[in-house]
Image: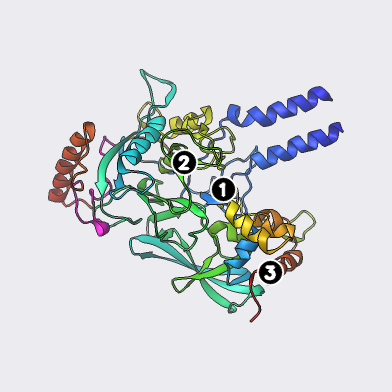
Amino acid sequence: MARLRAFLIGAIALFALRADASVSFTVVLDALTHDSVAACLETPVETKSVWEDGRIVTYTRVHVDRVIAGSVASEIWVRTLGGEVGDIGQQVEGEAVLRAGQQSLLFLTQWEGSWVVTARGQGQFPIVRDVAGALRLHKNAHAGALLPPQPAAVARVRAATSVVNAASPAADVLDGKSIDDAATEIGGAWRRTHASP
Amino acid sequence: MRRLELAIGALVLFAPSAAHAFCRTTTVAISPSFDSTPDDPCWTDGLPLYWASACVGYSIQQDASKQVSFDDAQTGMETAFAQWTNATCPASGTSTKASIDVRFLGAVACHKVEYNQNGGNANVIMFDDDVWPHDDSNNTLGLTTVTYNIKTGELYDADMEINTAQVTLTVNGDVPQNGFDFLSIVTHESGHFLGLAHTPDTHATMFAHYTQGATSMRNLSTDDVAGICTIYPPDGTRATATGPVPEGSCDPTPRHGYASECGGGGGCQAAPGRAPEGAASFGALALAAVTLRRRRRGAA
């Protein structure tokens, strides 16, 4: 019992010390898939930052390693806010951060003709190697200062399905999962939220 | 064993505050796979950000919000910034006040985030009641965009967007249990404005999680004070990556001059009917003089 308590205290400490980063509602799994056009495993290849209408935006060319759900080409440009041009840098906290060579699972949607990461940083799950050498999804710990999920969003999901994970925070559902397990989970959510043609 | 558990519990609760775990925003965006740990609480790649001048100016977009009137927004922002600028630091000579002042420069017409390299600027707080100009309209409540020099870490510009279409903010009176306290949110965002990042300290205003109905973020914790006093110590220096450097003289003019209009236009004037009062009126006159002087000099 004492060990259990100590473990719980440690676990709480680890949770408390995760420095999530901007002001957003936490996204639940089915809302994330609903708002996405595709989900894929990708590796950034190159980035180009430019000035657009007074602000810096970055276009990252990513190679799609595996399509998890939806439809997306084998290579696309993903637009994110912030970046560096010359000596000027700009940051928008909570935005997805795509770095060349750093593989992620991305939820993607289209906005004003560009591919963007759905729900900003919450739609990015970097792929990390665990102590046993297996590749796993990692919750983006810097997706902004997070509020609990919107009650209305949760209610909508619960009205549509009784699957527990559907209305759970996407980060909690997918964090630590292997790529195959994540693909299965996302596939289920995709079928629930995207009607068959 | 019981004592050990209590000791661990106490460590969990108090260690972050005691150790002053505050973090600074740096010139390199945080890697999404970075995990904060007790031994390594902050992302430290890049150079820490800071305002060089002893004074920084900010403006509020003239339309404010259906939820937050212009006057309430001004009062809220002044209160929020005052928390930081009036922080009492460990004594340094005769002064104990953080060496940064934030001044309200009046209303601006421009309603978008921008930084003009070849024109005037404004550090703007703006509200979006109807149309959120980004893709994630359902989830994002607020964004702070900071612009800086990547070789020095000097902040050039900071703009704050608040998505008032999605939530009801409590501006005056008691905050309902499921409500969002405007003052808590802008005090937190003001910390970002001044160069602070999220802290692991759960008691701090700069902690990343806001609890609905709470008002505790209105008041700075010891960790927050340590953060602002480290960046802007009372001795008038700036803590930079290369060591302390002297602050610049007090000039709240945004970089390249003050602009009310988008694109850097409408420089050096407050919007009609929104003339700053008191000290800020003096500030507007000072701005006019400074801007004219700069234009004559053709400063970059």
Is residue B291 something one can see in this rendering? Answer: yes
Q: Which type of secondary structure does the marked residue at label 2 adopt?
A: helix
Determine contact: label 2, label 1, CB under 8 Å: no
Give, as a three-letter code, the residue at label 1.
Leu
User: Mark 3 — residue?
Assistant: A192
Real-space Cα separation, disc 3 to disc 1, in angstroms: 25 Å
Determine the image quadrant of residue A197: bottom right
Name the mark on residue B185: 2
Judge depth for marks 3 and 2 and give the one in front: 3
Viewer-proximal residue among A47 and A178: A178
Real-space Cα separation, disc 3 to disc 2, in angstroms: 35 Å
Real-space Cα separation, disc 2 to disc 1, in angstroms: 12 Å
Give the magenta range: B248-270
Mark 2 surroundings within 10 Å by alpha-carbon count, few (fewer than 14), some (14 through 19), many (20 or more) = many
* Image position of B230 (left or right of A108): left
In the image, residue B54 lies in the stretch drawn in magenta: no
Give, as a three-letter code, the residue at label 2.
Ile
Give, as a three-letter code, the residue at label 3.
Arg
Which residue is at the far front?
A159
User: Mark 1 — residue?
Assistant: A146
* Total residue callouts: 3
Looking at the picture, how far across and down is residue B61, in whole percent? 30, 49
Q: Chain of mark 3?
A: A
